[in-house]
Image (spheres, rainbow, N blue to C red):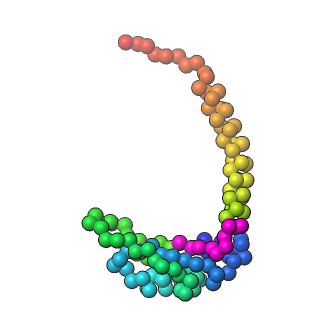
Amino acid sequence: MVHWIEKIFNIRRNTLKARLNIYPQQNREEIKRFWSDLTGIPIKNFGKSYVKPFSKGYKKNNLYYGTIRVEVPKSGDYIHRVYGWTQAVLEREDVKVKNIERRWVRLTKINRPVNLEI
């Protein structure tokens, strides 16, 4: 995602912000270093992490490095661009979907023999 943001919007990685979702038993600083190395976002750009509270239920699929949320500062313009792109794609696909729906409607109008043997 960070690579895509950098290439498409020409936003440098060192301007991006990040937040982590982690578990209480995890080492916050080690996980920040992991995500910083992976994404290229400097550790100083990491905001406050969300630490999920302990629960009595057994969670078998803890993500070892938690999850990251990447934030683009002043991203309103970029959000609108991505929204416009997705709308254009959906409009193009909508034509295909309508054609398939018409075929299905025609199939439902075909009279089929009913087997009433008792």
Nearer to me, 52 or 33: 52
Count of marks placed on residues: 0
Image quarter (top left, top right, bottom left or bottom right) of the C terminus: top left
Q: Is residue 42 visible?
A: yes
Q: Is residue 3 visible?
A: no
Nearer to me, 96 or 91: 91
Nearer to me, 22 or 89: 22
Which residue shows up at 33% across the image and 66% down it?
Answer: 60
Q: Is residue 93 magenta?
A: no
Which residues fall within the magenta stretch? Answer: 69-78
60 vs 91, left or right, is left
Is 102 above or below relative to 73? above
82 vs 44, left or right, is right
Farthest residue, direction left? 56
Q: Quadrant of residue 1?
A: bottom right
Which residue shows up at 37% across the image and 80% down it?
Answer: 26
Residue 108 position, x and y percent, is 59, 26
Is 116 above or below relative to 22? above
Which residue shows up at 67% across the image and 81% down it?
Answer: 12
Residue 17 position, x and y percent, is 58, 78
Q: Is residue 76 magenta?
A: yes
Nearer to me, 5 or 118: 5
Residue 38 position, x and y percent, is 54, 80
Q: Quadrant of residue 83?
A: bottom right
Q: Quadrant of residue 110?
A: top right
Residue 41 position, x and y percent, is 58, 82
